[in-house]
């Protein structure tokens, strides 16, 4: 269907060059129907005349069309395999998984008229940073808990085509795994798990007794998390401008200090966190999930 729609668009653009009676791209045909194109298809003689027309633009378009057909036939249209397995909405998701929204970032560092720096925390928003507390831990647990759900057979089959990794391992049911099968989840929630782990290591005295990993593996985990977050940030490449503001800061140092303060509260275009979180929850409820582990801090 995707291949047909693309060919239809090029086909309509080609015929629209010399006969305004045909539908142009400004009247896009229904993605689920061929009627808008089929009812206006020209005769074979007209096709031939236009194919040999000296019109350079028509000739170029025809060549491009031929190249497109050749490329599609060579690749066998493995287009679905090149798309992330969760790039399209799941059947139990009420809204598109990649719904975009405008969001202004919060909790920036600001300066007052005396050169003092402070965090602009909005008390009406959920807090994920600051001195450790049960409330902050609860917010994190609700954000990333239950992030791994049972995969469908088609998803397992596609993931096992990755020749760089071993085949997935079946997980048996226990007190946390609700159903035997193969499990996975979106990387965004794993990245958030890593960020939460780094946050906890800033207050190791508070969280030491609740750490699931033994001490000998904690540095390995944190090093992994730091580099995973680096790669995730580079992968998504947010280009929203962060503007700079010079601040003559009031500090305890015996000499003047100028900070170049990044103004991070610009409006960003983001994927909907609510849509992704709702989809993960719905998938887990439908297919089974690994229940979140909430140790007492």
Image: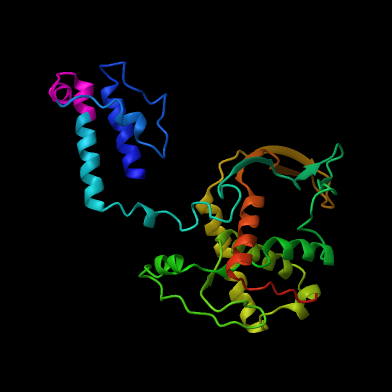
**Which of the 4 image quarters holds residue 37?**
top left
Q: Is residue 133 visible?
A: no
In the picture, which quadrant includes the C terminus?
bottom right
Q: Is residue 245 left or right of residue 205?
A: left
Q: Which residue sits at x=65%, y=68%?
A: 146
Q: Is residue 225 above or below residue 56?
A: below
Q: Which residues are magenta?
A: 45-61
Residue 158 versus residue 296: which sits nearer the camera? 158
**Which of the 4 image quarters holds residue 269?**
top right
Q: Is residue 159 above or below residue 86?
A: below
Q: Is residue 77 visible?
A: yes
Residue 280 on image: x %, y %: 61, 60
Q: Is residue 158 left or right of residue 149?
A: left
**Which of the 4 image quarters holds residue 145?**
bottom right
Q: Which residue sits at x=24%, y=46%?
A: 71
Residue 274 versus residue 244: which sits nearer the camera? 274
Residue 262 on image: x %, y %: 68, 43
Q: Is residue 275 left or right of residue 81?
A: right
Q: Is residue 290 above or below residue 85?
A: below
The image's colour scheme reads rainbow
Magenta span main SS: helix
Residue 153 versus residue 54: which sits nearer the camera? 153
Q: Which residue sits at x=56%, y=65%?
A: 185
In the picture, which quadrant includes the N terminus?
top left
Residue 168 on image: x %, y %: 45, 75
Q: Is residue 211 left or right of residue 82?
A: right
Magenta-span inclusion, residue 261: no
State the count of labels.
0
Residue 86 on image: x %, y %: 50, 57
């Amino acid at each position: 269907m995707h291949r047909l729609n693309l060919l239809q668009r090029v086909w309509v653009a080609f015929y629209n060059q010399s006969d305004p009676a045909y539908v142009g791209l400004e009247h896009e045909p229904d993605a689920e129907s061929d009627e808008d194109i089929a009812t206006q298809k020209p005769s074979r003689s007209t096709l031939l005349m236009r194919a040999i027309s000296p019109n350079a633009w028509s000739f170029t378009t025809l060549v491009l069309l031929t190249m497109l057909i050749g490329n599609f036939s060579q690749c066998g249209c493995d287009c679905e395999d090149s798309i992330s397995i969760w790039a399209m909405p799941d059947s139990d998701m009420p809204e598109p998984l990649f719904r975009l929204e405008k969001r202004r970032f919060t909790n920036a560092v600001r300066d007052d008229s005396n050169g003092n720096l402070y965090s602009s925390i909005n008390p009406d928003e959920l807090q994920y940073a600051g001195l450790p507390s049960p409330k902050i831990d609860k917010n994190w647990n609700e954000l990333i808990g239950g992030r791994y759900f049972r995969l469908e057979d088609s998803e397992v089959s596609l993931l096992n085509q990755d020749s760089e990794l071993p085949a997935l391992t079946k997980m048996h049911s226990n007190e946390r795994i609700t159903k035997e099968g193969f499990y996975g989840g979106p990387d965004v929630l794993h990245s958030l798990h890593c960020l939460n782990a780094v946050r906890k290591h800033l207050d190791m005295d508070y969280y030491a007794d609740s750490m699931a990993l033994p001490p000998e593996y904690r540095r390995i985990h944190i090093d992994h998390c730091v580099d995973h977050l680096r790669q995730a940030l580079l992968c998504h490449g947010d280009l929203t401008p962060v503007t700079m503001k010079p601040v003559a800061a009031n500090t305890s140092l015996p000499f003047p200090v100028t900070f170049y303060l990044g103004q991070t509260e610009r409006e960003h275009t983001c994927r909907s966190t609510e849509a992704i979180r709702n989809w993960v929850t719905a998938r887990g409820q439908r297919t089974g999930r690994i229940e979140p582990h909430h140790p007492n801090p």
